[in-house]
Amino acid sequence: TIDLLVCKLKHTWMAGVNSLVHQLQSMQKQSTFLHKSALWVKNQIQSSSLDVKSLQVLISAVSDLLSKLIEADGQSGYLVGAYIEHVMPNKTEWGKLHKSLSTEWMHKPLLEGRLSMNCEPLGSCVKLCGTTKLPGHLCTSALLSKMVLLVLENGIVCGSDDAERKKIDSIQLLYSLQWIEELENPPYLLLEYLRMLEEMHITYEKFSTLSNTTSLQQTVFDRSEEHGRLWSLTMSKVIRVENTVSCEMKQHFKTTEGFLPLTEGRLHTLQCLSPFLTEEEKKELVFHCVAKLMTCTQADLSSTDGAFGCLSILNSCLNGRSIDCDHLLPEILKIIMSWKNNNEDSFLFSCNLEETSAQLLGFNIEMIRYLPLLLKYSTDPLADNEWDFIMCSMLAWLETTSENRSLYHIPLVQIFACVSCDLASALSAYFETAAPETTEKLPVNLISEWKEFFSEGIHNLLLPLLVKVTGKYREMKNASEGSFQNSVLMSLGEALTYISKDQLLNHKLPAKFVAGQKTNLPDKLQTLLNTLSPLLLFRARPVQISVYHMLYKLMPELPKFDDEDLKCYGDEEEESALSPPAALMSVLATEELLLENILECIPVGEFAVIQPLSDEFCLVLGYLLTWKLILAFFKAASSQLRVLYSQYLRRSKTLNKLLYHLFRLMPENPVFSGPTSEVPNKDTKTFFTEQLHLDVKGTGVLSSQIPHLACSVYHITLKDLPAMVRLWWNSCEKRVFNVVDKFTSKYVSSVLSSQEITSVQTSTQLFNGMTVKARSAAREVIATYSVDDIFIELIIQLPSNYPLGSITVESGKRVGVAVQQWRNWMLQLSTYLTHQNGSIMEGLSLWKNNVDKRFEGVEDCMICFSVIHGSNYSLPKKACRTCKKKFHSACLYKWFTSSNKSTCPLCRETFF
Ligand SMILES: [Zn+2]
Ligand SMILES: [Zn+2]
């Protein structure tokens, strides 16, 4: 009905315009009506009060009006020219309109180092999320561009200078578009705006097809040089679209005089031009900058026309690739060191930033940014004192970062925090991956100093910092991903992934215990788990991933603390109270509860799309990461402990819930489309064949992260808990049973089978008397056992839906074993393979143990005819007082309950 109304109004309006235009032709050209309507339109678009729909209506109404005017005007274009003139903002108005764009756009380019600043960005800090009205700049630039396009399309020449000026003002549209592009998470309103521009054909491409854009490029360059900032970014966009840098632009940096004295505008222009320069041009620029750095006076260190500006340009030129000026890099370091000797006050070492100027912050940021580039590209070995300077400065800057966490809302402080953490990461990565040739050239003791002092120093600062910062954000409750603050979490999280297991174990965090928590872990380790585990649910991906990597390093350390308990439980039939780490299980319980709400409505087997970076995304991510940790813990445990942990998982039904959820989170077709490291071959790559890389900085495609992670968790679950998955599968209703069977056979079984086969083939495990071989094509594992004059061959056949279907054990050659005994052994092997939650090699090893024990003279349990119990791996220990035969406790318990008697199964005497 609204559309109908709009239609009617439009009809009436056009009728009015029509008659007016006819009158105009006969009367004077100056019309108060046109003037008034233009002013009204101008007010509307500048007022920042329109939403996308009303802007669209306005633009189409004005377009209709202009079309009529063009009809009336003929080629002269007088009326059209006058109308546009009235609507166009003047210089002051443009100035105001620029301020209607919030400064949020600055975060990304500042963080990425595309722009450097040494003053606090001023301007509107209007929070974009939740707004429903478009900023005036966007409305004005869209309407203006539409009008200019109309004029161009109709080939009207209205006073050439004038037309040129109007055309040039339409680059404001590019400025608007750049603003949107730089926002980290543009709200829906802006996406709608972009869609509207496409629909109405208001695009730069249209301009290029209708007219020569050389003058536009020149104007954009001039504005960049004058104002810098978003204009410089707009310029770099235009260059990218046009694919050329015009000669006039290049002229400017060819000579030192061209870009000196450096202003913010020139600095930003050079920074944004740098990716488009040839190697020669970059080299020249670098030479100029180094020369200027050498003569920099102390007073000029932090000014734009001094060291700050030159370092910024250097960093931009060096970033991305090394130019052939590697010999200059150590020179720059020497210059920086000389500044420190003469003017340590300019270095923000272990200090309070509250009183610090933006200039000093900017200067320090550029120095910090330079050091990783030096590490990356310098080919000359650094001297002892140079390493010393780098390491000590890094720690001193990190201390400043850690002490000023209450100031992270200030953009430059935040960038300072990010780059200092990034420097720590760069150093960690350097020492972690340094090739032997490199380490040989390093000063003696440097590596040990790094490990014992500097690396430890980094993590002693950063681990507590993560805990404090996340604690503070949780109070604020709006640490949404993409907010500027998250950039610190990203750099901090990345630096923490380098923490070593020993550094974690020796943490200095305040004690944290949970009342009633069942645990065998030492206090310090329990504190660490209690502190980190809840952060798996923190609503910011970088924290979740970083915490996951840290906890992952701890998992293999944990099961051994439960060994004591094993002695009491292993033999009893009573269910043990052992569980995977309580801290993780309590996080899991929270996640399960929340996840139920989201996924419950989705039928098992249907794919739930999780919007990247939404609340749901963080929840599902946390849930899957928690499971990856639990599975890693499980894998590190001994067979006997695994039995107890799996009892817990069965009792609590958490594993069943996981499997149902996985069949809502794994895509129907798990094809991997990202970049692969290997040479492409004809096999399709899937989420099961490709490794998932969980980077804190998240360079991968976020939308495939949850599906890939879900597949990875399913993969590990099948691999390490095959018996439990089988149990679940057999309990599923028919439809789900089929879905699971089909998906698993199609995508997972072959991957798992070949992994099992390969692990048999490459296993270095030696069995005394037993050899194991595997044939991949036939999906067979062959074990031959020979002791004295006995020889048996057993063939293990993996089913096509491995590990869901049961593994069959067939016989090969057999010498010197009685039929009954041999059948018994085959049965036992298949029991071990079916009931155990481990690999085939582990199953074989259990079986071998069983047979060995028998040869050693240990007697079978007379109930199950095995020495080692088929599911809890215990030995027969309960002896009958009368006949002296021994039984497994579990077997006896079963016997007593099923027969409802308490007599010995053999001699029928009462069992004591
Ligand atoms: Zn038994
Ligand atoms: Zn007996």
Image: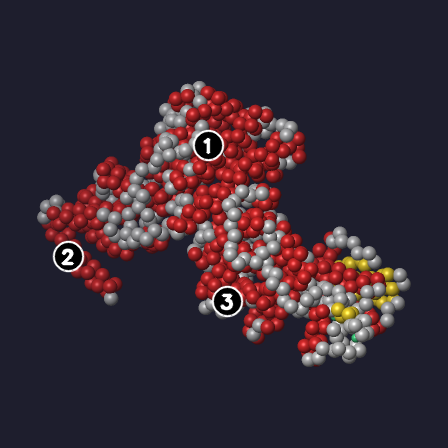
Which label's residue is closer to the chain start, 2 or 3?
2
Badge 2, how many Cα within 10 Å: few under 14, some, many 20+? few
Q: Which mark is residue 194?
A: none
Question: Between residues 312 and 837, which one lies in front from this camera angle?
Answer: 837
Kindly report which numbered mark, 1 or 3, lies closer to the viewer in this rendering.
1
The local secondary structure at tag 3 comes to: loop
The residue labelled by disc 3 is 606
Task: Name the amino acid type tagged 1.
Answer: Ser
Q: Please, what secondary structure does the residue beneath circle 2 have?
A: helix
Residue 144 visible from this viewpoint: yes
Q: Position of residue 620 (x, y in %)?
A: 49, 58
Number of numbered discs visible in the structure rendering: 3
Residue 869, horizontal then vertical, whole percent: 73, 67
Scheme by which the image is coloured: secondary structure
Which residue is farthest right?
789
Q: Is the Cβ of the residue at disc 2 closer than 8 Å to that at disc 3?
A: no
Residue at x 37% of width, y 39% of height: 410
Q: Of 175 and 536, which appears nearest the observer?
A: 536
**Quadrant occupied by the C terminus:** bottom right
The amino acid sitting under disc 3 is Glu
Side of 302 relative to 452 (left or right): left
778 is higher (above) or lower (below) than 68:
below
Residue neighbourhood size for the residue with mark 3, other residues' Cα within 10 Å, grouped as few (<14), some (14–19), many (≥20): some
- C-alpha distance separating marks 2 and 3: 57 Å
State the residue position of label 2: 16
Q: Is residue 201 visible?
A: no
**Mark 2 or 3: the one toward you:** 3
Q: Which residue is mark 1?
A: 350
In front: mark 1 or mark 2?
A: 1
Ligand 1 contact, mark 1 (Cβ < 8 Å):
no
Left or right, residue 904 beside residue 377: right
Amino acid bearing label 2: Gly
